Every structure is written in structure tokens, then in C-alpha cells.
Image (cartoon, helix red, strand yellow):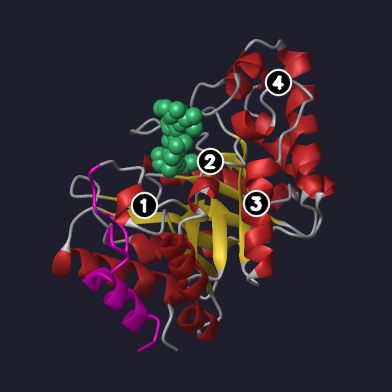
Amino acid sequence: ASTLGDAAAERGRYFGTAVAANRLGESDYTATLNREFNSVTAENEMKWDALEPSRGSFSYGNADRIVNHARAQGMDVRGHTLVWHSQLPGWVSGLGANDLRSAMNHHITQVMQHWRGQIHSWDVVNEAFQDGSSGARRPSPFQDRLGNGFIEEAFRTARAADPNAKLCYNDYNTDAINAKSNAVYAMVRDFKQRGVPIDCVGFQSHFNSGNPVPGDFRQNLQRFADLGVDVQITELDIEGSGTTQANHYRTVVEACLAVSRCTGITVWGVTDKYSWRSGGTPLLFDGNYNKKPAYDAVLTALGGT
Ligand code: G3I
């Protein structure tokens, strides 16, 4: 195999990227996307502020452009994200508990039914835990007004809305075994024990010199997989350049391949020039869509040439 998607497919995995709808008209962007990747995540277009900017009024246009492009290319789609404290429209934050509960469930149901059967995995809840040593929940309108049960409620609502979608919990700084990942682990174990529907855990994997690829990354993925969920690397990017960056990317791919329930990898953008890390070079293609050493390392690690 000579592309990331084909090489990953031969290993029984997908290899995806985040996509921005307003870049699809750029021919080099779309050519690289279509050639290399077999799964996409909307970088911003499926977030609450984009899909339901005012209560009960849904705007699917930009996200539909991504989904339609992916389907026309035979790519899978990851849904990102239904319940998150960020990119949340102001009207949600102003609601009282009962209203917020029904708004959350309505949002999940409407959005998932819009793409029912077309999205392989949904990030149902994103980033609900705090950084640091507490293992506590992050303050948010959902946490503050609905309490710990909001995550369980969101997953139950999601299962009913699209029974064929894999339902994921997604977070960052959970890539190592640490207080935050321990807290997520305890939640997933509890959900599995009590029959709360959850199918996968997403590890964002935004790495840089201050947050390097952890030495226990594979071990951490494995302990979640051992709970009976799939694991996915959902927003991979690694600051740096050259051989050092390439080696870090290789480590991540090898970790996923070593865990049979690691079903796929998504990098958080096609080209360095549109990375959310402004001025950074964390991705596999440079600003001119040239393959970087990191690209070669990933392709080789996947078994491609
Ligand atoms: O669309 C508006 C545009 O109309 C406006 O003129 C412009 C001015 O600032 O802003 C544009 O919105 C920006 C949006 O990206 C689209 O480009 C927002 O300001 C900007 O905040 C937003 O950043 C996104 C960020 O999430 C927001 O939290 C990044 O693109 C996106 O890559 C990033 O992705 C997150 C994941 O969803 C969750 N995990 C972390 C990851 C990286 O932060």
C-alpha cells in the first residue's frame, strides 16, 4: 500500500484527518485528503454552536458538505462532538436544569438522527474531566446544573438516537496513566458494569515538548481496551520537525497497532498551514502539501511503502 488509508486498511484500521469545510475548494487540499485518508472528522462544523446556534434551529450545511464529500469518496465519518463545554452557544449556558436536560437530549437526538447510519463513531461527550491531580469533573453548564449523571444520560440518549453508531468518550491529557485518565477509566469501568452504553474511548493525543508521547501510551490504551471498549486516537498532532517528530509519530502508530482494539487513528488536520496550532508544524504534510519525514514514518509503521 502506498497511502496512509490503504496501509491502515490492510492492518484492519482507518486512518483519518480533521477537515474544514471551507478548505474543500482548495484543489491541493482535497487531492491530498482524497488520496491519503479514509476517515474524516469535521474540525468545527459538528460542534453545538455550528449546528444549533439558536434553540431548536439547526444548520447542517457546512457539516453536510463534509459528510457528503466523505461518502462520495467512500470514507468513514467520525462525529465530533455532541456535548462539550466549549463552542457552546450562549443560549445553552443560560438554561436552568430541567430546560438544559431537555435541550441536551434534543440536541443529541436531532443531530444523530440527521446522519443516522452515516457516522461510524460519535464523540458523545468531550473533555468532561479536569486536568491535574484531582480526577474531578470539569465545571460546565452540564456538570454544574445536571451533576455527574449528565454523561450517562447523554450516552443513553445517543444509543437510542442512532443504535448503529459507536459511542465514544473523548478527552486530552489522558494518553498516559495519570489522575485524569484514571478518572476516565473508573467512569468507563462503572458504565460497563452497569450496562450504560459506551463503545469507545478517544485519546486526542495532542503532543508537544511539554506533553511528549508518554512511555506508557500503549499500556494505557490496552487497559481501556481490556474494559471491553474500542480505543481510537482521535486528534493526533505532534509539535516538532524532522527525524524527532517522525520518531514520535512512529511510536504512536506502533502503540495503536499493538492494541487489537485500537481501531483507527485521526490526525488533526491535513497540512501544517491550517493547523489549530498557529505557527506550528505538527502534521504529516507541510504547507505545500509535501510529505514530511513524519509521513514516511507513519506509512512505514503501517506496513506501507
Ligand atoms: O468561524 C469563525 C470566523 O467566522 C471568525 O471570523 C474567526 C475569528 O476568530 O473565528 C472563526 O472561528 C474559529 C474556529 O476555530 C473556526 O476556524 C474560532 O475562533 C476558533 O476558536 C476555532 O478553533 C477551534 C478550536 O477547536 C476551538 O475550541 C480549532 O479550529 C479546532 O481545531 C479545535 O479543535 C479542538 C477539538 O475540537 C477538541 N480537542 C482540542 C482541539 C484543539 O483545540
User: Is 298 within the magenta?
Assistant: yes
Q: Which range is magenta?
A: 279-305
Q: Report, in whole angstroms, how far the alpha carbon at label 2 lies from the one at label 1.
A: 28 Å
Q: Which mark is first along the chain, 3 or 1?
A: 3
Quick check: 128 above or below 90? below
Q: Nearer the viewer, mark 1 or mark 3?
A: 3
Identify the residue position indicated by label 4 in the image. Answer: 54
Nearer-the-camera pick, 232 or 295: 295
Residue 24 coordinates in the image, percent (x, y): 52, 55
Q: Amino acid at mark 3?
A: Arg
Q: Nearer the viewer, mark 2 or mark 1?
A: 2
Instruction: Give yes or no for contact between labels 1 and 3 (Cβ–Cβ under 8 Å).
Output: no
**What residue appears at the point 37 percent right and 44 percent down from the top-left corner?**
173
Q: Report, in whole angstroms, how far the alpha carbon at label 4 lies from the one at label 3.
A: 21 Å
Q: Amino acid at mark 4?
A: Ser
Residue 65's disc is 3
Q: Nearer the viewer, mark 4 or mark 1?
A: 4
Q: Report, in whole angstroms, how far the alpha carbon at label 4 lies from the one at label 2.
A: 17 Å
Q: Amino acid at mark 1?
A: Ile
**What residue appears at the point 58 percent right and 41 percent down from the top-left corner?**
45
Identify the residue position indicated by label 2 in the image. Answer: 44
The 10 Å Cα crowd at callout 2, few under 14, some 14 to 19, many 20 or more, is some
- 253 left or right of 145 in image: left
